[in-house]
Amino acid sequence: MPDLSQATVKTPVGTQDGQKNGAKKRGLARVAAASLIGTTIEYYDFFIYGTAAALVFPTVFFPAADPAVGTIASFATFSVAFFARPVGAVLLGHFGDKIGRKRTLVWTLMVMGVSTIGIGLMPGYGVGVFGVFEGGIGIWAPIILTAMRFLQGFAVGGEWAGATLLTAEYAPNGKRGRMAIYPQLGPSIAFFLSSGTFFIASATVGASSTAFLEYGWRIPFIASSVLVIFGLWVRLAVDETPVFKAQQAAGVTSRREQKLPFVEVLRDQWKEVLIASGAMATLFALFYIGTAFLTNYGTGDLGFSRTTLLGMGMISSLVFGAATIVAAILSDRIGRLKIIRTVLVLSVPWTLLLFPLIDTGSAFALWAGITGTLVLYGLAYGPTGAMLPEMFASRFRYTGAGLVYNFAGILGGAIPPLLAAQIIMTNDSVWVGVMLAAISALSVVCVIFIPETKERTMEPVEN
């Protein structure tokens, strides 16, 4: 009898290939889950602030002001995060380009979690929290709120670019648009969850009750701790991207005289940063007007209940998510720019018609206005997750994509909602639409100068 104790068992070639393919699919599934869960948590935390800014913060943190001034002050703190986002893009982007995508993404999640839970545990201006500080903490309340909001923006500034790079640098050739679906679905899922948690809290505690103002609105913030723990568990299980590993192995960054990714990207691709930021500004304007601002406008100016607006938001988020998926998949076939350019052109007439539509006072018209605005955003946002990483060299890709995304956030996400609140105070609402149409027209001009990117390589090469 032959001795089989040392025999080598050969696996058939077909079986080996099947095992490799299975392992590759499982690896891609983990990457998809890590990017999806991460951006969902990040934007859930970010959006519940926007919902609270519209519904309760004017009362809880700015009670000394009249309702209109309180709303402006509330959205001013909302805007603080957008100015913090480029700071996060520069600092976190630096580490993302130097020490890796994965390690940086773990830190973005932790910072966002701590700041969001901190907001949920804060006493108000004249309102305590869970029986503590029953008289509130006065002026310290809006000051601490602003600091927590800054940290939220700082974390988001480094989150999106890292999540999209995670999928783009793992994606097979010709499927970067499809892989980009996962981080790009984060906002629609987060909007559904944030609207849903506030809907439940409002319906359970009572939308206008003292209990809702004291602790009901805090539930979504504190509940994010569960999501953060789960998100960290998923992200820690993902390996570093193959493109970043190849970049380290090739020593691409060490051969460069300039070691700072921020300086490199502004030196070598400053035109791309400026043009792409202008092109993407409309996306943020559509999203934040369609969510946080219209939530406030629907309750304050049109007289709809909080629960009605939150229910509308939940339904709209499902349509918005479907539009994101369709556009991202289609971008692998016809290109990113064809879709984005078409959406930006359509945004000009849509924004002009938006407020005359919703000012009819019909609940369906308001829902159609919110949904139409978010669908346009989703159609352009889907391909963006692949396009922005494709625009930049790997050695400063994290920083470059993050800068564009967050500069655009200031232009479209911070300034328009703040201006819109001031416009509504003194002028007809149609002028908000005129402002949005002007931003859309600027984006149309900018996007003309962006070349198609879907055939570009993601490998770490010297440029």
Image (cartoon, rainbow, N blue to C red):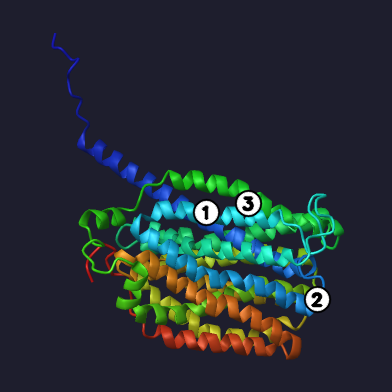
**Residue 262 x, y percent position in the rendering:** 37, 70
2 or 3: mark nearer the eye: 2
Q: Earlier in the sequence, mark 1 or mark 3?
A: 1
Q: Residues within 10 Å of mark 3 (few under 14, many from 20)?
A: many
| Identity, as a three-letter code, of the amino acid under mark 3 | Ser
State if disc 3 and disc 1 touch (CB < 8 Å).
no
The structure residue drawn at horizontal position 45% and vertical position 55%, both measured from the top left corner, is: 105
Q: Earlier in the sequence, mark 1 or mark 2?
A: 2
Q: Nearer the viewer, residue 254 or 231?
A: 254
1 or 2: mark nearer the eye: 2
Per the image, the residue denoted by label 3 is 224
The structure residue drawn at horizontal position 24% and vertical position 61%, both measured from the top left corner, is: 254
The structure residue drawn at horizontal position 22% and vertical position 58%, both measured from the top left corner, is: 251
User: Image quarter for residue 136?
Assistant: bottom right
1 or 3: mark nearer the eye: 1
Q: Which mark is residue 65?
A: 2
Residue farthest toward the left in the current orientation of the protein: 2
Per the image, the residue denoted by label 1 is 109
Measured in 3D between alpha carbons, the distance from the residue under mark 1 to the one under mark 2, in whole angstroms, is 34 Å
SS of the residue under disc 1:
helix
State if disc 3 and disc 2 touch (CB < 8 Å).
no
| Identity, as a three-letter code, of the amino acid under mark 2 | Ala
> Relative to residue 420, is residue 233 depicted above or below?
above
Measured in 3D between alpha carbons, the distance from the residue under mark 2 to the one under mark 3, in whole angstroms, is 30 Å
For the N terminus, give its image quadrant. top left
User: Image quarter for residue 366?
Assistant: bottom right
For the C terminus, give its image quadrant. bottom left
Q: Decide if residue 186 is in sight here.
A: yes
